[in-house]
Every structure is written in C-alpha cells, then in structure tokens.
Image (cartoon, grey):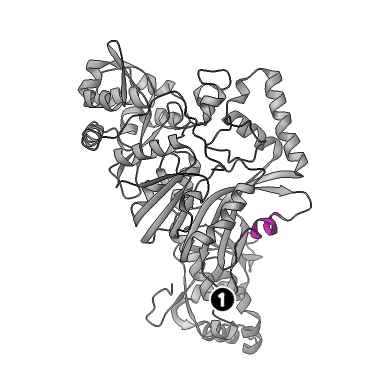
Amino acid sequence: MGGVSTHQPPFRLPVADAERTARLREALSAASFTADGLPDLLGSSAYAALARGETVPALRATRGESSPLETLVRLFLLQRPVAYERAAAALPAEDCLADGWLVREGDEVRASVDVRPYGGPDGQDWWIVSDLGCAVGGAGGIGGPGGARDREDRSRLVLGVGGASTTLAGLTVPAPVGRVLDLGTGSGIQALHAGRHATRVTATDRNPRALAIARLTLALSGAPEPDLREGSLFEPVRDETYDLIVSNPPFVISPRSPEGSELVYREGGMSGDDLCRTLVQQSAGHLADGGWCQLLANWQHVEGEDWRERVASWVPSGCDAWIVQREVQDVSQYTELWLRDAGEHLARPEAYAARYDAWLDEFEARKTKAVGFGWITLRKSGADRPSVTVEEWPHPVEQPLGGEVMAHFDRQDFLRTHDDAALLTARFRLADEVVQEQVGPPGAEDPEHVVLRQYRGMRRATTVDTVGAGFAGVCDGTLSAGRILDAIAQLLGEDQVVLRDRTPQSIRLLIEQGFLWPVDDDGIEAR
C-alpha cells in the first residue's frame, strides 16, 4: 500500500496450472505434509523451533530414512536441495518442474518458494506460499543487509504466516457475508479464511508479487479463484462496497525509505501512523450498511495527547468501533524490533548505529514517546450515537475471538436502546465459565472484595460489591433485573427504590464486559 510500483525481484515464481496443482496438493496430503503431520515427524521441540525460524533441529530430524514427508520438509521448509529421484518419489516432479515449484540443478532439485502447511479452523489442510526464507522472521531471515539479496531486491518479498496473521484471522467475525475485501493480502492467508463464509472475495495489494503468491496459496489450498487487484489502499476498489473488510496492513512506523527500497510487507510509504488512520477513515465509504472493517494497527503515543482520544478521532461518523491496545513499546524497543526484523543488526556497527539514530530522530520530530499495537473493529451501524470503545487489554485472550467481537457490538446495541427503566425490566443470564473469587485475609468472616472472572473470550476480571455478586449469581434468565434487586434489598434490609436507583450503572458495566447476557421472552440470548 501507499503507492504502486512495478519493480519485481529477479527470481521466478511458479504458475498454478489447475490440474497439475491439484496433483501436487494430493501428493502433499498423501505424504502427511500437513499441520498435523509435521509434529509427528519432527517432534514438538523441532517443530516449535521451526516456527521461530530455527532450522537445525528440523534438519537433524530429517536426516534419516528418505520418507516422502522428510523429502518435502527438506525441500519446502528447510530449502535444501534433494536428489531428483527422491523428489520424484514424493511429488509429481515433472509437473512441479513444468510449473516452476521446483528448479533442477544437475541431479538435484530445489524449491523456488516456501510452502508451509497450515491448519484451517475447521480442520482443513491448507498450504501457505511465501518467498524463500520468509515464512517467519521478516526480511532479516533471507540474508540481511549486504546478503544474498540487497535491500532493493528484498523490498518486494512476500512473507508467510506470522503472529499478526493468525491474530487477525482469529478476530474476524464468522458471520456469512456476501462480499469480502482483503486489503493488502500478502500471502493470501486472510483471503483463504474469508472464502469459508463469503460469496465473493476480492484481494488487493500494491505489490504485484504478493498477488501472484496469494494466487498460489489459494490454488494449492483448493480455494476458489479470487478476484485479485493491484493498487494501494482503496484505489483498486473505488466506488465498491463490501460486507467485510479485513486488513493486516504495512503498519510499521519508520523513517521514509528511499523510493523502491522500502520493505513493502511492513512499510506503507506514509509518515507515522498516517496509513492506519487513512485506512480507518476511508473504510466507511466502502462498507455496506451493517458491514464490518477489521484491521491490525500501530499508533503513536504523542507527547501531550491521550492516545485513546487520538485513535478514537480516526473513527468515521456512522460507525461503531472497538479499539483494543494489546502492547506498548517505548521508541527504543520498537526501533530495535523492526531493525532486527529487517536484518539491519547484521550490518556494520556504524551503519546500524546510523540507522538506529535515524529512527529516533523521526520519533523525536513527531514527539512520539511510545508506539501501541492492537486491533480495530468498525461496524457501519448508522447510529446517531455511535458506540466507540477504546481500551488497553494486554492480557491473554481466547482465540478465535470473532464470536466475541460480534457479541461486543450486540451488547452495545442493547445498552444503547435500553434506558435504566428498560434495563430493570430485562432478564439476564450469567455468561458461561464465570467464577467468583473472594479476596481477603484467611479466616476473615467477610471478604475484602469479590472478583468475577471469565475463562472464555476476553477473559476479563472485575471487582463487584455484595449486591453485584448476588445479582450476577442469581441471573439465570428467569427473573427481571428489577425483581432480583428487590429480593436482594429485602434480604439486606435496604430500601428497594434506592437500590434500584444506584445499581443500573453496575449492571451496564457487567453487560458491556460480557459477564451478563440479555435474554428474550423465550429465554434465548438476545443478539
């Protein structure tokens, strides 16, 4: 994103002939070159190391008998040449040579791309294609500065599946939709997920090499042919609307790179966090009524500004939003992370120091003291009083979280349409797997405070008083909130009117955070 370039690195990608690709997929599956098959071969330790970009344990695990699975691991994951006869025993080798998946070098063949097994959410066997050495670990994994590929060649490289990719896939709302836009598709992983519940998927990228690799990922995984378009941000889909927009954009906040040398997979060609802001602000014009936009983002913590207010100001009118900051790094930590990602730490010490200095100069000029990372979900509700929730939540959550994302907005709809009087006539059910913890000195007659804790979804915890704990414990969908409060007031000897007046705000918080669910007249959760 950020601008279109026609530059391509001087190395060839495979093509995806339909029949030959189907035979290759069958061979991969038959050899158990799958997300379930790899741990069985490599063992948990070597498999985990491979996910970190460390290959030595997997090399040791595949140096024995030449089974088809060992051959495929060495070819596609470890990028080692193997004898042609060995490859032919595991694959339709001539098909792979014809289409360019393999390249022959004398009596040996090598892979032209990384092919990595990936387990779909419903047990599907998928395969993600990326450039050699780029499955994990960023561009630093393929040589770094001065290595086999210079920065200009590396600028158009396409990475495979990382933590950000799987986070976004798990966040994506699972509702069936008509049209989906995967903006900045990269290796095609989000388009692959979207194809499970969408009628039509459009995938865009400013990098033509990414579009070619996304086509390979989808073809090899047996997904329908996508609508692939080259261009930056919403340029390729001008005047079109979608039910769901997903994006893992190039959100890294870094100094501007010379033209043609930026790492396209992570740098959007805009200053600061302008790319993420622009994407959010322009998304409403490409959403159908009720449509969703979900993306990962980085944002600056600017001196003298509240980051919550700053990011909330990006939200377009007519859209509800849920913005969650998952991590914050000071500018030094952030700089070191992304210099290492690009392999800059492998350069000469003076060159690394100069590059580090340039990043800090950029942050100082923009009065940036830290950088936040998180996710943003928008829903085009058209509401006169949009719900915009901005919060910091660095704690573990339960993935996939897409159902909880939908539920959050459902709860906001309920709260927006129910004043306090209506709230007290409604009935609620305590969410599943909520436990109550009483905190206080051992042997004390009464706890100092009571904590409600979730073990699903966001896994929140909240402190409640005696009334709140008693109220939540009784909520099973049979009695209205008002009747429950009246019973509690009688039990505690309190005035019923006073208790009804002071409790709704606490009930609203329990609903908003997902501890209580509204139920309809049939006892079914109101969504």
Q: Main secondary structure of the magenta part?
A: helix
**Magenta stretch: residue 254 in it?**
no
Q: Quadrant of residue 308?
A: bottom right
Looking at the image, residue 53 lies above or below residue 243: above
At label 1, the amino acid type is: Arg
Element at badge 1?
helix
Residue 298 locus on image (x, y percent): 61, 46
Figure quadrant of residue 450: bottom right
Position of residue 278 measured from the top left corner of the image (x, y, whole percent): 60, 52
Residue 358 shows in this picture: yes
> Is residue 399 visible from the viewing direction of this image?
no
Q: Residue 246 at what x, y percent from top left? A: 47, 52
Looking at the image, which is closer to me, 181 or 229? 229
Q: Position of residue 185 (x, y in %)?
A: 45, 44
Name the residue rendered at 60%, 20% in the picture. Answer: 346
Quadrant in which the N terminus appears: top right
What are the residue bounds of the magenta stretch? 307-316
Count the marks: how many? 1
**Which residue lies at the image location 58% right of the left edge and 50% below the top edge?**
374
